[in-house]
Amino acid sequence: MLSGRRLDLLDPSPLDVEISDIAHGLARVARWNGQTSGDHAFSVAQHSLVVETIFRHCNPKAGPDEWLMALLHDAPEYVIGDMISPFKAVVGGGYKQVEARLEAAVHLRYGLPAHPSAALKDQIKKADKISAYFEATVLAGFTEAEARKFFGQPRGITREMIPIEPVPAYQAQNLFLQRFEAIEAERASTIWGDS
């Protein structure tokens, strides 16, 4: 990693996870294999910000730990890249095992449970599908009918509510880091109070 950390993919240690590496990597991984409109790729870092925004809107009682899990929902992709779902299905269990180990290392590094609960995972997945719907229709050339078929009809979220214009990698990286730091500040104030 650029931080100088060495991450063992088969047995990743939380001690080797750095948010700077995650932000850097996710900002340079393109969603939709780069098949999107605009001057810049729509990065996994930007997607993560959109998912976290949607998640907060759909789950107003959620707190900073849940926000952070939503922001980090695709964190393993900073190492293994973003594979389209049909290809993940072909690759099968080996990919899922590596992804789960990386997710656990990232979560444990930041004081979260190794994996989200089933209910939280479902809430994040719902936000992820809403994001995918808007990415598909705004950036990837899908018709609304095609996007509804694959991702469902978004409810309560409009395109204007989410930051979906692709930005340069360095900007996506900075936005991701800023949101991470804001959530961490919220988590600290929840634990220690506003003294």
Image (cartoon, rainbow, N blue to C red):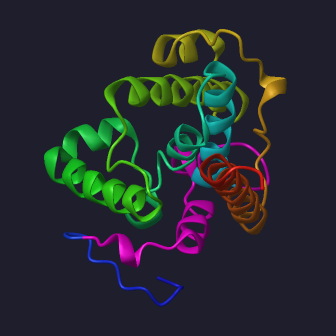
Vertical placement of residue 19 versus 195, above or below: below
Q: Is residue 21 magenta?
A: yes
Q: Is residue 62 magenta?
A: no
Residue at (61%, 42%) from the top-left corner?
Answer: 64
| Residue 158 point in image, percent of width and height | 77, 18
Query: Is residue 36 left or right of 148 when viewed as pictured?
Result: right
Residue at the front extreme? 195
Instruction: Give the total of numbered labels.
Output: 0
| Residue 145 point in image, percent of width and height | 59, 9
Which of these two is toward me, 79 or 66?
A: 66
Residue at the right extreme? 160
Vertical placement of residue 155 versus 142, above or below: above
Which of these two is toward me, 66 or 165?
A: 66
Vertical placement of residue 133 versus 163, above or below: above
Residue at (50%, 44%) from the top-left corner?
Answer: 69
Work out whether residue 141 can be spotted.
no
Residue at the left extreme? 93
Residue at the bottom extreme? 4
Query: Is residue 153 left or right of 87 when viewed as pictured?
Result: right
| Residue 28 point in image, percent of width and height | 60, 65
Query: Is residue 172 left or right of 108 when viewed as pictured?
Result: right
Which of these two is toward me, 156 or 114?
A: 114
Residue at (78%, 56%) from the top-left corner?
Answer: 195
- Magenta stretch, residue numbers: 12-40
Vertical placement of residue 179 versus 90, above or below: below
| Residue 184 point in image, percent of width and height | 64, 56
Residue at (72%, 59%) from the top-left corner?
Answer: 172
